[in-house]
Image: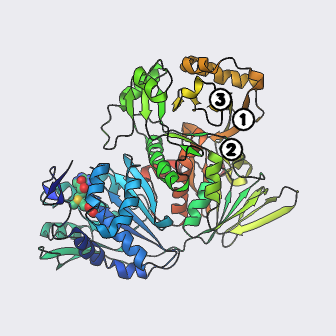
């Protein structure tokens, strides 16, 4: 917990201050910004180029805000900043607010930071600032764990250009200054990377020399006579980012990928066979923003957790809660089976530094949802529903995206400089286009493209039912999930669903599937079923669409071969996972910092997970 000493934030756990008592702001500028020559290096960036900063110890976020402010002041338009930071003991909402209130000149940045902060999750967080110019990747975990999962070493080239070493003092916080941490810093660095720290401890400098930095002392800030700074040998090679991209598929995955690339200055053509966006599974009137994980936290669950935090913060910018296109009404995961009771029991024993959900009994569950529940479960206060086609529209209307609706793609071919796509438009006329990169986001239909023929994609038909609300049923005011979901009545209807029929690609609405949805509702939420009264199955509205899944429910996101990427197999979670997957694809394509630990990036990667049959 944050303590205060002489009007400054102080840690009782470590017995140290978060920053210099002379002036944290000036110290941050002197030690970290000047110590790494950032004004000069930011100003020298070219449009399309990205600079990556790494920090040990996010604390109050002061260094981040200072770096963001400087970047806005001196970097040319079109250049972007990645800031990676690590924090094991994140401050509570009000602690961060109070700590940042010390700096009136950073009030605008601090306000945005607080909005993002309330969306933090345990593990990796990816937030964007300044209209997408600045990306913060915050790993809420131990320093050694986070550093080991950055690009570098067995995970390819290091990407960090400059480091802020800002743990508590080495004597009081030795695990932030260990040989393992120094080795992790060197491994994650680009050739020629610099570092700066307020510490003048000789053993810190010697430890950094051990891992390859040339270290020197420099004048310190305030009462500190000396600080240290260093540089790693070599000159970084910079890869030219792609200038153009063709994204295939106008659902959530494709619209999100187009948006993430456009934010990095890439000219995007978004191609969709249908005459409108969100014509497939992304066209449902409700999407449930819902994260379901196991206590084991394997790569899939780490991904889902990071995607949940990312989706909430990205939606805050694009589709703020308004009760019409998005609601943050809360969500109950009902403990409806022995397996669920066991899973929930394990989850609540986790000691996550960020609270995300709460176990509730049947009585509290009934109060929270407004409807009598026979069982309790897990309550997610920030979850809710979204209108997915509206989100697709918002993503796809960003500057730099050109829509090519009614254009089907039949072939992809590598050309000398990039890729050519060819197909037919709605009138049967042949068309083709070229771009530096192609991103395939068309669900199970991807297997009709030769490069994806071997992908293990399964189509899964899902039907939702629209149930007319009654005076009694409109009392439901939260989403309830069991082996399907029910949403509060909106525009007169509860959306209930969905069925799962594997290898079925028929999209006609079936009475028998309505019966399945209603039977499940009756089993798990009898009070709601009763409140809905008699329903004529033949008269019910509904919608059937085809989702796409891959073995293990892990989506396939990443590079397929040079210049060819995909975001596929999001199953029923597209609303949750499309946005973060898009960030991953854009970061891989532009050779910038990925938003996820490399252990997860590797598991998502089609290139590493699947080998084309002919190469086996
Ligand atoms: N850079 C910060 C700022 O701008 O406010 C100040 C950082 S403060 C001096 C050091 C931070 O390191 C604290 O927030 C502390 O919780 C964090 N920390 C300490 N030990 C850690 C560890 N083993 N792993 C990750 N973070 C740690």
Q: Earlier in the sequence, mark 2 or mark 3?
A: 2
**Location of residue 511 by image quarter:** top right
Residue 602 x %, y %: 48, 51
Residue 334 lies left or right of residue 529; in this view the side is left
User: Which of these two is toward me, 155 or 404?
Assistant: 404
Q: Which mark is residue 283?
A: 2
The residue that disc 3 covers is 499
161 over 504 or under it: above or below:
below
Mark 2 neighbour density, 10 Å: few (under 14) some (14–19) many (20 or more)? many
Cβ atoms under marks 2 and 3 closer than 8 Å: no
Q: Note whether ligand 1 is within 8 Å of mark 3.
A: no
Numbered disc in front, either 2 or 3: 2
Give the image location of residue 605, x and y in percent. Answer: 53, 51
Under circle 1, the secondary element is strand
Callout 3: few (<14), some (14-19), or many (20+) C-alpha neighbours within 10 Å? many
- Quick check: marks 1 and 2 in contact, CB under 8 Å? yes
Going from the N terminus, do you reach mark 3 or mark 1 first? 3
Image point 45% across, 76% down: which residue?
237
Q: Nearer the viewer, residue 378 or 173?
A: 378
Residue 190 visible here: no
Percent position (x, y) of residue 297? 40, 39
């Amino acid at each position: 917990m944050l303590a205060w000493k002489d009007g400054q934030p102080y840690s009782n756990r470590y017995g140290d201050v978060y920053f210099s008592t002379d002036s944290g702001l000036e110290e941050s500028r002197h030690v970290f910004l000047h110590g790494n020559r950032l004004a000069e290096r930011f100003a020298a960036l070219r449009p399309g180029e990205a600079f990556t900063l790494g920090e040990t110890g996010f604390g109050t976020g002061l260094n981040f805000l200072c770096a963001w402010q400087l970047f806005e002041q001196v970097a040319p338009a079109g250049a972007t900043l990645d800031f990676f930071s690590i924090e094991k003991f994140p401050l509570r909402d009000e602690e961060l607010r109070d700590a940042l209130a010390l700096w009136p000149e950073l009030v605008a940045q601090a306000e945005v930071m607080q909005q993002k902060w309330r969306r933090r999750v345990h593990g990796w967080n990816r937030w964007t600032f300044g209209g997408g110019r600045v990306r913060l990747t915050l790993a809420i975990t131990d320093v050694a764990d986070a550093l080991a999962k950055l690009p570098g070493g067995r995970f390819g080239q290091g990407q960090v250009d400059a480091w802020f070493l800002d743990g508590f003092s080495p004597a009081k916080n030795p695990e932030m200054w260990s040989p393992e941490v120094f080795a992790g810093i060197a491994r994650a660095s680009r050739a020629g990377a610099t570092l700066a720290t307020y510490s003048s401890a000789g053993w810190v400098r010697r430890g950094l020399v051990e891992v390859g930095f040339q270290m020197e002392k420099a004048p310190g800030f305030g009462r500190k006579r000396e600080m240290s700074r260093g540089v790693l040998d070599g000159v970084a090679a910079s890869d030219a980012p792609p200038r153009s991209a063709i994204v295939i598929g106008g659902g959530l995955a494709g619209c999100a990928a187009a948006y993430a690339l456009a934010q990095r200055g890439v000219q995007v053509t978004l191609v969709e066979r249908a005459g409108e966006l969100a014509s497939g599974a992304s066209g449902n009137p409700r999407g449930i923003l819902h994260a379901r994980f196991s206590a084991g936290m394997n790569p899939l669950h780490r991904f889902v957790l990071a995607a949940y935090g990312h989706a909430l913060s990205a939606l805050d910018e694009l589709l703020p809660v308004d009760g019409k296109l998005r609601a943050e009404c809360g969500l109950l995961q009902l403990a409806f089976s022995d397996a669920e009771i066991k899973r929930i029991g394990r989850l609540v024993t986790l000691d996550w530094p960020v609270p995300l959900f709460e176990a509730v009994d049947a009585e509290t569950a009934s109060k929270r949802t407004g409807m009598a529940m026979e069982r309790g479960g897990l309550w997610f206060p920030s979850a809710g529903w979204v209108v997915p086609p509206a989100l697709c529209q918002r993503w796809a209307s960003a500057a730099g995206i050109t829509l090519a609706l009614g254009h089907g793609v039949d072939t992809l071919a590598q050309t000398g400089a990039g890729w050519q796509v060819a197909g037919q438009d709605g009138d049967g006329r042949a068309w083709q286009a070229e771009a530096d990169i192609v991103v395939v986001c068309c669900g199970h239909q991807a297997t009709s493209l030769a490069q994806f023929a071997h992908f293990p994609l399964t189509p899964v038909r899902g039907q939702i039912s629209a149930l007319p609300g009654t005076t009694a049923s409109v009392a439901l005011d939260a989403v309830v999930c069991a082996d399907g979901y029910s949403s509060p009545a909106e525009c007169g209807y509860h959306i209930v669903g969905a069925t799962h029929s594997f290898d079925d690609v028929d999209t006609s609405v079936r009475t028998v599937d309505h019966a399945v949805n209603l039977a499940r509702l009756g089993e798990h939420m009898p009070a709601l079923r009763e409140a809905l009264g008699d329903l004529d199955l033949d008269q019910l509205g509904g919608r059937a669409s085809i989702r796409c899944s891959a073995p293990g429910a892990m989506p396939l996101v990443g590079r397929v071969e040079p210049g060819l990427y995909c975001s596929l197999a999001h199953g029923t979670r597209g609303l949750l996972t499309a946005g973060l997957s898009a960030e991953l694809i854009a970061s891989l394509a532009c050779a910038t910092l990925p938003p996820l630990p490399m252990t997860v990036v590797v598991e998502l990667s089609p290139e590493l997970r699947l080998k084309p049959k002919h190469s086996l």
